[in-house]
Image (spheres, rainbow, N blue to C red):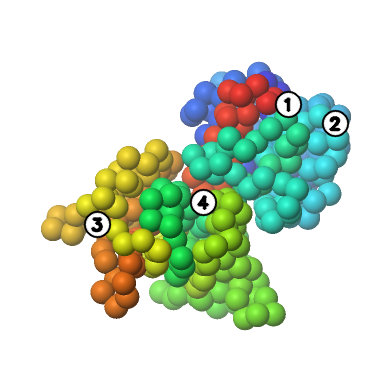
Amino acid sequence: MKVAVVGATGMVGEVMLRVLAERNFPVTELLPVASERSVGRLLPFRDREYPVIGLADAVAARPDIAIFSAGGDTSLEWAPRFADAGTTVIDNSSAWRMDPGKKLVVPEINADTLGPEDKIIANPNCSTIQLVMVLAPLHTRYTIRRVVVSTYQSVSGTGVKAVRQLEDEIAGVSGEKAYPHPINRNALPHCDVFQENGYTKEEMKLAREPQKILDDRTFSVTATAVRIPTAGGHSEAVNIEFREDFDLDEVRQILSATPGVVLQDDPATNTYPMPVLAHGRDEVFVGRIRRDESQAKTLNLWIVADNLRKGAATNAVQIAEHLLERGLV
């Protein structure tokens, strides 16, 4: 297959290439795409190097699939051009996620809704993906009424500039800043830009995207998103109120049997999910499972995942795999 990776020189783009290679996706021709300043640069993929090309040249090459990780403005302008050329676009930005005409897909949950008419497919927000991977099977069994989520998000979710800020601050050197305050030895309750309602854009993604993925507006989600000084991996403290009561052993059994989810829940041995253990992994890890003793039919748990892999690159590649398996590309 002819595959374009748009934003191939960025943090997610680099992981995208790695995941395509690791999962042996049948790439017969790779088109690494980036901004004009990167055109001509050679990027390694499998056993050879490929030159970076510009967006116009990539559209003209008519790839079968284009996986975008280049920001919302680029996606809004260029994804339709690829689609018009017959390419199926899998977009990692927020540009198309809440568009009623576009599918928002986590393959383990709703890939079966995709059809040949879906030429632009949205990849959910990284924090949303790991959240819904746990919510979906529990919602099927107990029916969710309300979710309260607090996130602890790594600097890699902001990008390479933020990673460098953290590294500079740890080293005690001055450099370019991604955040309005220091991030080392700090926690910023500020992920993405603030909206008129006082929530950040990241918090509103968490509030709206799960409803679309699960195709159910009868439950609600409220979020507080916090940036912490970890290099990679997002964590979430999640409080879930159900319409039906639950049994904790059954909850653990359900999550243990969920594809893509790993249960790490043994306080006696200090076993629980942590970003350092999720690094480089494609699974979503869940633990600290306990009943909320302040309210009936309510569960507390802790979710961790590598935000650059399952939270971005791996989910996109899984969508591509599904399209290929069903003959949609």
Task: Give the Cα separation between the discs numbered 3 and 4.
Answer: 23 Å
Q: Position of residue 176 (x, y in %)?
A: 62, 67
Task: Identify the residue at image location x=72%, y=46%.
Answer: 102
Q: What's the residue at 55%, 35% (across, down)?
A: 318
Instruction: Name the element at disc 1.
Output: loop
Dot 3 falls on a residue whose secondary structure is helix
Q: What's the distance in space between the residues labelled 3 and 2, CA to CA?
A: 51 Å
Please tell me which of labels 4 and 1 falls first in the chain. Answer: 1
Label 2, secondary structure: give it: loop
Q: Residue at x 26, y 50 (%)?
A: 250
Q: Report which residue position mark 3 lands on.
A: 248
- Point out the residue furthest to the top here: 28
Q: Which mark is residue 129?
A: 4
Mark 4 or mark 2, which is nearer the start of the sequence?
A: 2
Depth order, front residue of 178/279:
279
Q: Which residue is mark 2?
A: 85
Q: CA distance from mark 1 to mark 3?
A: 45 Å
For disc 1, the marked residue is 64
